[in-house]
Amino acid sequence: PSIYIGLYDKCSYASRDRGWIVGIQAVSDQGYMDARFFFSLKTDRAYKVTTITAHQRYSSNQWTHLSVTYDRRQMKMYVDGAQVAVSNEQSGDLFSTLTRKCKILMLGGNTSGNNYRGYLEHFNLWSQARTQREIQQDVRHQSYRKTNHLPQLVLYENFDRVQTLWLTGKDGTYPKIKLSYGSEWHLDSSLAPPPCGHTTCDNVEVITNYNHLSSFRQKKVVRYRVINIYDDEHRRPTVTQLQIDLQHYYLNKVFGKYNITWELSVLDIKNSSLRNRLILANCDIGKIGNGNCDPECNHTLTGYDGGDCLKGLCFYEKKKKRNGVCNFECNSELFNFDGGDCCNPEVTDVIKTCFNPASPYRAYLDVRELKNVLQLDGSTYLNIFFANSSDEDLAGMATWPWDKEALTHLGGIVLNPAFYGVLGHMDTMIHELGHSLGLFHVFRGISEIDSCNDQCMETEPSLETGDLCADTNPTPKHKLCQDPNPWNDTCGINNFVNTPYNNYMSYADDDCTDSFTPNQVARMHCYLDLVYQSWQPASKPPPIPVAPHVVDHTAESVTLEWLPPIDGRFYDRKNNIVCSMCDSTMAWHTYCLEATEPHKIDTWGLSLKSEMASPPDVEQACETSVRTWSPVSAVNAQTVPPACPEPQGCYLELHFRYPLVPDSLTIWVTFVSNEWNASGAVHDIKLLTVGGNVFSLGPQNVFCDIPLTISLSVLEEVSGIQVYTLDEHMEIDAAMLTSAPQSPLCAECKPVQYKLIRDPPFQKESSVIVTDLSRRYID
Ligand SMILES: [Zn+2]
């Protein structure tokens, strides 16, 4: 645990836990997840200690008002004024007057070294249990400043005069005083998504505003780019001009109704090598020739999944191997692809015969390889790629807006050219664009769930479950243009009426699908604002997602506060790129750009760059993910993973795009093996400075569901870090350096201007312009 404060008994050696403590501890058995506020208490006459914990894990990097009370009958805990835990287990006086002299109050830790590493703004100790009403007043008005004189207030500590009131603990130092630059917000700015959602756009309050306010759904122009591959002579395009024109016309006809207009660009690429190869839409090349028949990789040009989907035999194996001819019956993994003959460009037309996934001449690529070859910027256009599929059903694939790749060269949409700009298949691209703009299938919640306990299961239409739209009734997956046939659902739901089969996000055909619902349109507009600002030529900031709140009032005035625009940018978009990394205190953030792990760079150096170089994006903390770095991911599947050997273990080296003098370092460790607890996994973090110095920060406690933030006091520019671990399965999602507030790098940035309107009007004028970063107005 990490202890804020406790009252201990220094006389009683028999029972050292008399008194009370308040702090943070992990609730789960594993000890590396679900850290919550706790309050433990044991009266002098009680046999055992009672601990109550908060209802959910604490939010890091956010001020919290935490109160605990004991009134001789009940222990209670309040978080930001809300009662979150209660117990009747302890009763009577905390201690008798006889033992009063034995009691000591300790702040910031205990004698066992369970110290608190964070900030405390103030601390009050009352001789009487405060009521919930009084506590809520404290939260709202910060009235502790006014209640100084109350006789029940035993101790009021704001750390102005620590040295005169307190004795130092073990190392003889007092806590450091740090001035806060940012305003102390009253407004809760965490617009959390529901458990089944991903982003702010899934937050019910936000999406309800997008539904109700037409100004949030004003016309948006969005750029997309068709990547058309030709041969070297600029012949044989992947798709024809007619397909492109037809599909474009149709897109705008459909989306125009919903105030979204698509602006077309076409990029012609002359490359016979790419044009002649099969581009596989959803086959992982590693599965070709792995011994299992993978239908998504089964194609004549993969040699039927490298032979995995073939039952034929190579009768003349010995005779035909390395005979200078590509013998098709031996062209499979089983026979080492005819001993190499079928991938030898001097022997055969490799573009037709080379099925060996390990050969550079192979006849096929997967989409990810294609995207890596092309390296097309995904931040200014939605890129449209084409690929074939062995599976006739697969018409397209899209990148979700919450994917880390959404704005990179690995994002975009992949379409089967047979389903693009072809009458009868025009809705395929509409459907994929829906996914790109944050829409789920209408059958999510019935069909796309893991179990009947899945938090996305949808029993009635809702903004919080299923496809997160309340105007699409639950439905199982089917292709009919009517309500589904009677259905034997394993979760016991079988009455599906008025189902959205003519919705573009269903699996019905073109002659059936014809609409998006208002909730879907709201989601698309929200995601265009939240993620895809850079695809739009317009530079106007997106809306403030929720209305301003009254956070305080007196007899003569009200104080209003509001959130920044939904894309989280505090500064005008027309300024330089650096401004997008400045926060409201003018502190500057930089995420790690690339990662190298010196011993194994050739096996995964490249892929790691794209997985790590951006904000955290793991969907489910505390579970393994492919989007992270991990020592074992560096090793290919055939070899035995190396244990991270003691004492150094493995380390990951991360580099930042812009070196800076950091105020803090934040690391998202999203997975730790069961063998480790919070304190064992990361045994050192080293800062690498531009000047070549190395500073060790020592072992760190990590929780997989809470980012680790370490306050730093280096005076040099830091360009990278090394994270040391003995846990070969540990996964790191992202890392970020933050400068001190008021960074000169942010000085040039122009804050977004806010226009505040109220009905009835404000006392002085009808509307107010706020041009600074305060986001607060007192009328
Ligand atoms: Zn789909």
Image (spheres, rainbow, N blue to C red):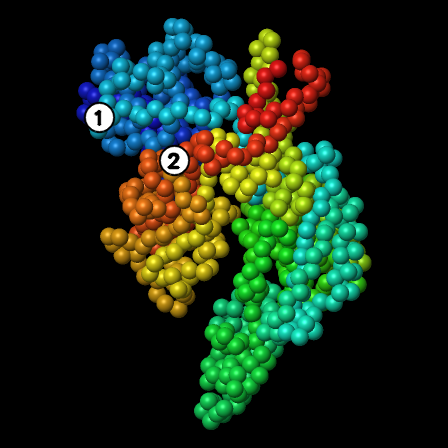
Q: Quadrant of residue 227?
A: bottom right
Above or below residue 281? Residue 193 is: above
Amino acid, disc 2: Asp
Which quadrant, please, contains the N terminus?
top left
Q: Classify residue 361 as left or right of residue 278.
A: left
What label sits on residue 663 in the rendered view? Answer: 2
**Label 1 residue near ligand 1, CB within 8 Å:** no
Q: Residue at left 41%, top 14%?
A: 129
Give the x, y percent position of residue 539.
Answer: 65, 40
What label sits on residue 402 in the rendered view? Answer: none
Q: Secondary structure at mark 1?
A: loop
Q: Which circle, 1 or 2, is nearer the viewer?
A: 2
Give the x, y percent position of residue 119.
Answer: 38, 27
Q: Is residue 497 visible?
A: no
Give the x, y percent position of residue 576.
Answer: 55, 41
Which quadrant, please, contains the C terminus?
top right
- Of residues 74 and 172, the one nearer the viewer is 172
Q: Which residue is mark 1?
A: 172
Q: Quadrant of residue 665?
A: top left
Mark 2 residue crowding within 10 angstroms, few (<14) / some (14–19) / many (20+): some
Above or below residue 430? Residue 316 is: below
Q: Residue at left 42%, top 47%?
A: 656
